[in-house]
Amino acid sequence: MAKYSYKLKLKIVLEYIDGKGGFKYLANKYNIKSKTQVIQWVNNYKALGKEGLLRKRQNLNYPLEFKLDMINCYLRTEISYNDLALNNGISNSNLIAQWVSQFRKYGVTGISKNQGRPLIMEDNKTKKKINNENNSTIEKLNLELVNCKAELLNYKIENAYLKELRRLRLEETLKMKK
C-alpha cells in the first residue's frame, strides 16, 4: 500500500494551488515527512495533471533507445532530473537518475540488461538449444550494436563539450584583446 493516498495528495495540491498555504505549512499540517514531497506532488500535478499523482500499479519497461535519449539529454544540457522527467511524462525523476548512474558505472549493459531470472520450460529443452545457438549470435550482434551506439554517444558528448570549451576560450581571448 502506498504511504500517502491519492485523495490526500490531491487535497494537498489543491490547497496549495488555492493559496491556502505553502509547502512547509502543508507538509506540517498533514504530517508529511518533508516539504520536498509536497513540491514533487505539485510539480507532477502541474505537468501531468491528476495522473501525475497516481501510483503506478506496474513497472513500465522503457526501450533502450528512450533511456539513452534521456541520458544523452541530461548529460548534454543543464536540465534537472525532475524537469527532464516531467517534460517526458515520467512522474518519478529518480528513475532517470538511476539510469544515468547505471550508465556511468556499467555503460550500456547496465541499462539494457533484463532483470530477474530467465524463464526456462522443461518441455522445450531441445528446441531451446537450437534457438539459443541462433539467438546467441543475434544477441551478440545486438549487444555489439548497442555498445557501438553508446560509444558514439559518448564521443558526441565529448565532442560537444570540447566545442563549448573552445568557444568559451575564444570568447575569453577576444575579451582580453579588447
Image (cartoon, grey):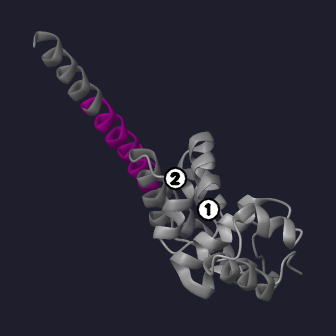
Q: Amino acid at mark 2?
A: Ser
> In terms of image quadrants, where is residue 29?
bottom right
Q: Is residue 91 above or below residue 98?
A: below
The circle on residue 65 is none
Q: Amino acid at mark 1?
A: Ser
The residue lying at 61 percent from left, 62 percent from top is: 93
The percent position of residue 66, horizontal first and vertical second, equals 46, 66
The residue lying at 62 percent from left, 87 percent from top is: 50
The circle on residue 80 is 2
User: For the residues marked 2 and 1, what is the alpha-carbon distance in whole angstroms?
Assistant: 9 Å
The percent position of residue 64, horizontal first and vertical second, equals 50, 64
The percent position of residue 133, horizontal first and vertical second, equals 58, 66
Whichever of callouts 2 and 1 sits on the residue coming sooner in the sequence is: 2
Which sits in the foreground, 131 or 22?
22
Quadrant that contains the C terminus: top left
**Helix, strand or loop under label 2:** loop
Q: Is residue 160 above or below residue 30?
A: above
Magenta-tinted stretch: 144-163
Can residue 57 be spotted in the picture? no
Which sits in the foreground, 19 or 6?
19
The residue lying at 65 percent from left, 54 percent from top is: 98
Question: Is 36 a magenta residue?
Answer: no
Say whether marks 2 and 1 touch (CB < 8 Å).
yes
Q: Which residue is mark 1?
A: 93
Q: How many marks?
A: 2
The percent position of residue 14, horizontal first and vertical second, equals 66, 83
